[in-house]
Image (cartoon, helix red, strand yellow):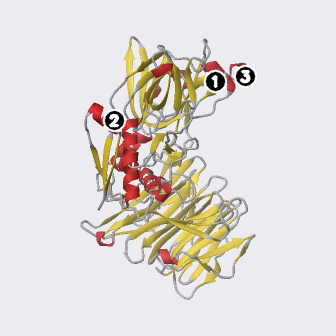
Amino acid sequence: MRTLTPSLLAHQAAARRRPAVRVLLSRRRAGVPLLAFGPPAALPGSEAPHALAVTAAGTRIQLVNDGGSLRARRDGGPWSGVLASLPAGAPVAAAAVPGEIAAAFADGAALRTIHSFDDGLTWTAPATRVTEAVPIGSLALAGRASNGNLCAFYSLGATPAVKRLRRTGGTWAASGTTWTMAGSWAAVSGLAAVHAAGDFHLLVTGTAPGSGAALAAAHVMGDGGLPANAWFGPRVAAAADAASGITFDRPAIVWAGQAVAAFREVRAAPVAGSRALLAQAVSGTLAPWSEPVPFAAGAPFGLALAADGDVLLAARVGAVQAAPLADELDVSALLRRFRRADGPAVSRALAELADPAGLAGSEPLLAPGAGVEVSLGYCSGPGGAPEYGPAFRGAVEAVERRRARGVETAVLRIAGPWERLAAYRAPATWQPPPGSTRGELLTALAARAGIPVASAADLPPSGAWTTETAAVAIQAGEAALPAALRLLEPTADAFRAESGLEICGLSPADPAAWALGAGGHPLLAFEPAARALPAWTRVQGPDRAAEAFRGGELLRDGPALVPRRELGAASDSLAGAYAARLLARLRRGRPLARARLPFHAGIQLYDVVDVVHPLAPGGSARYRALGIETAYGPGGFETALTLGEVN
């Protein structure tokens, strides 16, 4: 249920209504950037350890360890002279803060820096900031734009002994401070850092203790958003079994609303090779990561990432690629028709746009991969200002251009979170840590498809999502949707598509959110249908079983047992609860009525509605919304509801 303004509530129930629509195309879906990199632009130079930063003036600064000589260039121009000497192959890092760009590099056991205060035109002489007892292995540098503070992160060799060295108020600390996360790593092969959302975000590659599995994972060091200098994590972005012959190194991280990470995957067998992978966090601090995807073959020294205003840059020494972040196109005035279907496992829409200028053939956002936000409502505000209900957000999966009788149109087929989850196929076997709760499993699984998960505010999820553990594994090539539905089945909860997916707790005691019919929102049609409902379930656990049934209905309608096997039914109480929840879910899934009404801006999936109508049982009945279809166009502006049992 979404709260609507009194003016919108009154207008949508009135006899005369003025629809309002808004359709925006962008490079985001549910706040997650939809990255569409252009082709690589070639740059001069041989691949070597490198770094990238963008100054406040928008100048792109690249640094490279050119066989033992540190050099810099501005905006892909010629390389500078030698700025410092360092061992060939040693790591370099860069960070920009207002009025300054800093570069750090490892010189054996010494951490040294150079700085430019004129947008990379000139550089200071190298200065040693700290000297350790052993050579520095990996290195990262990040800056806080609000105060110009810097922090370097470095590892002692390949050990998990990672240290931080802070510059505060222009003064560097006298020595490095060891982090508290060493127990999460057996070895560290790479570090990358960025300051965003109030804290330092560190991407680490290496191996896990005990198993020896290859890992790429994020940590956060607090800097005000979280307690200062406290460490959190890890949040694993990628993992590979020790026997797979896969390792990860050369990480990079940037903030583009959420974290975007790159790292190199190196395969020793069956065919040796390497490639750069990209992954995205699906929400804020320490959010789960999307499935890492191949981005560039080879890339022996990995990618460097930086945000240049409204563009995300991914660079090697010899090439740079750009992905727009802030493009937006308002096509509200072009909308001819809109249809949306929302259900327990569907969140699909279709938008038909008038296209007299042929934008679908030239506009990059009128193409597959663009984000779509459609808001529907009425001109019910002061002076006829538009007021909207909850927006539908999805991504364009197809664009069909049509021309008939001299009229050109573009039809956008839009996939929501459910379709995105259904399309995801795991590239390798995916299995989360043992002991994960159902909520943790769903959140991690949906994130692999790039979908954020939240708890519904109006229908809080049950304790099954926070207390009950479950096991799930997805084989390579297997779809994620069936696994998500398996997690759902033995609970009293449901998922609905909003910006991402929302977990909703459903109870027979849920109050009615809306009234339809006499005294409420007008009904155009109401069609109840009496039908037999499932009445008998059995849940089989590893060593026990339980049943739930409605005896009177079984005698009337005949026995029709629905069995399920649930490994989590490890006690009598859990087995009994699973059987009862399964029966409620099956009964709720059978439609008992259909209702058609003028578009209602506030109804959401699983809202409870009271229907007053002569055909309703007893003249008034309570239902739960199991499906919502929205139609806008010349034929009208309506909502169609599929209604089921409240349980």
Tell me the kind of residue under disc 1: Leu
For label 1, the crowd category at 10 Å Cα-Cα, with few meaning under 14, some 14 to 19 and many 20 or more, is: some
Q: Residue at x 47, y 19 (%)?
A: 596
Disc 2, SS: helix
Closer to the camera in the image, 95 or 475 = 475
Q: Nearer the viewer, mark 2 or mark 1?
A: 2
Tag 2 residue: 552
Counting residues from the start of the chain, the first of labels 2 and 3 encountered is 3
**Disc number lying in front (2 or 3):** 2
Q: Is residue 437 shown to the viewer in this render?
A: yes
- Disc 3 is placed on an element classified as helix
Q: Which mark is residue 367?
A: none
Please name which of the two marks, 3 or 1, marks the residue nearer to the observer. 1
Horizontal and vertical percent position of residue 645:
43, 33
- Mark yes or no: residue 350 visible: no
Relative horizontal placement of residue 467, taking residue 529 as reference (left or right) = right
Give the residue drawn at x 37%, y 45%.
582
Q: Residues within 10 Å of mark 2 (few under 14, many from 20)?
A: few
Labelled disc at residue 382: 3
In contact (CB < 8 Å): disc 2 and disc 3:
no
